[in-house]
Amino acid sequence: MKGDDTSLPEMGDVIDDLKDAVVFLTRLPPGLVGVDGHRRPDFRRGARVFPVVGALIGAAGGVVLVAGAVLGMPPLVSAGLAVAATMILTGGLHEDGLADTADSFGGATSERRLEIMDDSRVGTYGAAALIVSVVLRVAALAAIAGGGALAAALALIAGEAASRAALVRVWHDLPAARMSGLAHETGPPDQNAMLIALVAAVAIVVVTALPSVGFRAALLGSVLAAIATYGFIRLTARAIGGRTGDSLGACQQIAVIAFLIGAAAT
């Protein structure tokens, strides 16, 4: 009985973390998820479930991709609709971070780069980064879908999960570049949350990517995502001295692109 009593609060904590993460990472209304929209989440622990929410986002895109294939659409069209579905579900949250981060590289100093990140306007670097992100994701998914729509859908689930683990890793590893913003106020994830997120992502990749694209492609995608995340951590540390909410979004985009490119190399 004692073991049962201690497990129940833990399960309740996981469910609460999932609800907070869904509201944070998507544009679903808090009331629909069962979360008080005025309550500030605490992701020092809750970030552990980010890969699970990433998998759900990927699943939404995967359903659209498979539906497109069933309706007789070409793989490129189905892949484009799938990527669009993930962007609609997240409100382009991470794409916005990618654009702002890319624009910031036009600054000569860390202070100037942070100022550019705060500017809501999208510049040339940001627009180019968005185009490259969408094109590469659609192209990689279409290539995988050539061997079967279900395989591409499962690869998308794996990539979205792995990229959320990458986001958590950057959030944990780098200090805040500025003492403001939601990413600073609700985190960073502690060591345990970061490790659980990585394990969860690996488990999701094993369950989804291994049977769909095979061991070699799943491993290559995972390795490329890990290398891209490590490189981004080093680059961001030098460029702005830490992480911001925008850089977390940029990392997610870079990691999912890297994973899908690897998964497409079948």
Image (cartoon, grey):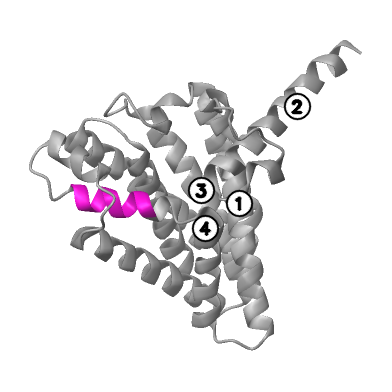
| Three-letter code for the amino acid on which mark 4 is drawn | Ala
Q: Is residue 203 left or right of residue 96?
A: right
Image quadrant where residue 6 sits: top right
Is residue 56 visible in the rendered image? The answer is yes
Q: Main secondary structure of the magenta part?
A: helix
Which range is magenta?
96-104
Residue 34: % across, % down: 72, 38
Name the mark on residue 162: 3
Which residue is found at the position 62% from the left and 66% from the top?
Answer: 62
Q: Which residue is mark 4?
A: 218
Q: Which tag is nearer the camera, tag 3 or tag 2?
A: 2
Q: Which tag is nearer the camera, tag 4 or tag 3?
A: 3
| Three-letter code for the amino acid on which mark 2 is drawn | Gly
Mark 4 or mark 3, which has the lower sequence index?
3
Mark 4 or mark 2, which has the lower sequence index?
2
Which residue is found at the position 36% from the left and 63% from the top?
Answer: 133
Q: Nearer the viewer, residue 129 or 139?
A: 129
> Alpha-carbon distance for marks 3 and 2?
24 Å
Q: Which tag is nearer the camera, tag 4 or tag 1?
A: 1
Image quadrant where residue 212 sits: bottom right
